[in-house]
Amino acid sequence: MEQTLTEVIQEGKQLMLKAIDHLQDELKKIRTGKASPSMLDGIMVDYYGNPTPISQVANMSTPDSKTIAIQPWEKSMLGEIEQAIFKANLGLTPMNDGEFVRIIIPALTEERRKDLVKQAKALGEDCKVSLRNARQKMMETVKKEVKAGYPEDAGKKRESEIQDTTNGFGKKVDELVAQREADILKI
């Protein structure tokens, strides 16, 4: 009985960690006014018929804070990379000069910054929903175990641990969103 309860709580914590990791990945994709190769994470390029991450077919760098330079390992990939960036619909315009694909990051308007902050907050809320779902699953298991004969005071202690864990993860979500919001609003 105790083993299954411990396993369920560990599984719930793993779900919460995955939710935080997913939030971090999604927040990286929200662009700030500063160029970063991570903005292109998730863009897939057709590489000899196989969808391949852009980072696996080219070197990406940021020569300055407003430019991303992409140098493919094979010149034949220049057009593919350019098309993949257009298709990703990031609001970025790649320029192909025959050697590199360069992306100039335009300055964000105040309105666009506010939209991006809303997007970051929405991602944070989605993550919190995932945390609450994991908490709910763990709480239901504790309640079932108490009905099946697990000591009630130990069950209350477990519920308190679960709530404390959920609150800790919730604070982490708030910190991540606030940090990204500050990055977006910084001019």
Image (cartoon, rainbow, N blue to C red):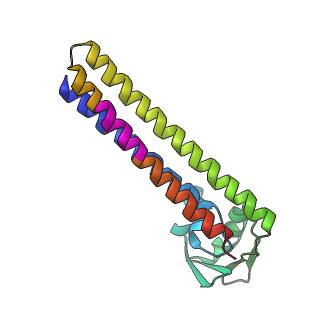
Which residues are drawn in magenta? 158-167
| Image coordinates for residue 104, horizontal then vertical, percent | 73, 78
Quadrant position of residue 75: bottom right
Relative to 179, residue 158 above or below: above
Extreme bottom residue here?
A: 63
Extreme front residue here?
A: 153
Decide if residue 47 is in sight here. Answer: no
Q: Main secondary structure of the magenta part?
A: helix
Identify which residue is drawn at 66% across, 69% down. Answer: 32
User: As drawn, is 13 to the left or to the right of 154?
Assistant: right
User: As drawn, is 112 to the left or to the right of 36?
Assistant: right
Which quarter of the rendered picture does the N terminus lie within? top left
| Image coordinates for residue 4, horizontal then vertical, percent | 23, 27
* Residue 67 lies in the magenta stretch: no
Identify which residue is drawn at 58% across, 76% down. Answer: 74
Identify which residue is drawn at 57% across, 80% down. Answer: 61
User: As drawn, is 7 to the left or to the right of 41?
Assistant: left
Relative to 9, residue 165 above or below: below
Identify which residue is drawn at 71% across, 83% down. Answer: 98
Quadrant position of residue 186: bottom right
Which quarter of the rendered picture does the C terminus lie within? bottom right
| Image coordinates for residue 109, horizontal then vertical, percent | 80, 69
User: As drawn, is 18 to the left or to the right of 151?
Assistant: right
Decide if residue 161 is in sight here. Answer: yes
Relative to 142, residue 31 above or below: below
| Image coordinates for residue 18, horizontal then vertical, percent | 43, 47
